[in-house]
Amino acid sequence: MLSSNMLLRNLILLIDVTFSTPTTNFDNRSFGINDEVNLAVLDPAVAARLTENFEEDISHSRRITLKEWNRRSLYERSLESIGWFLERQQ
């Protein structure tokens, strides 16, 4: 969980040489229905900078265990259910 506000982003870094930043979520809907875009760059300098940015983001986050996740409040679970339902209406 991130402790500060930030934009959620997908980022794939491969061996500090190349990266891909897709809008695609890794689910059947994104691959089969949605129009999605991916950007891939083969540039060690850019990959190194994005690695630094990612590590900075991680330093402002905290690990959530399965036990903590399962202890979410009724309010949080209700919001998730509402979000899940609304997502299916698209």
Image (tube, rainbow, N blue to C red):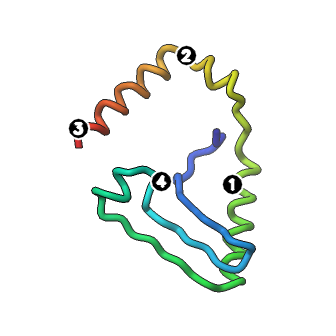
Which numbered disc, 1 or 3, marks the residue closer to the eye? Answer: 3
Q: CA distance from mark 2 to mark 3?
A: 25 Å
Q: Are marks 2 and 1 in contact (CB under 8 Å)?
A: no
What residue is pinned by disc 1? 57
* Quarter of image, res 46: bottom right
* Quarter of image, res 30: bottom left
Sequence order check: which comes first, mark 4 or mark 2? 4
Sequence order check: which comes first, mark 2 or mark 3? 2
Q: CA distance from mark 4 to mark 2?
A: 27 Å
Tell me the amino acid under the disc marked 1: Asp
Circle 3 residues within 10 Å: few <14, some 14–19, many ≥20: few
Q: CA distance from mark 4 to mark 1?
A: 21 Å
Q: Are marks 2 and 3 in contact (CB under 8 Å)?
A: no
Sequence order check: which comes first, mark 4 or mark 3? 4
Sequence order check: which comes first, mark 4 or mark 1? 4
Point out residue 76 in the picture as x, y percentages from the top left corner: 49, 22
Point out residue 5 in the picture as x, y percentages from the top left corner: 57, 46
Q: What residue is drawn where x is 74% and y is 67%?
A: 52
What residue is pinned by disc 4? 26
Q: Are marks 4 and 3 in contact (CB under 8 Å)?
A: no
Q: CA distance from mark 1 to mark 3?
A: 32 Å
Q: What residue is drawn where x is 57% and y is 81%?
A: 41
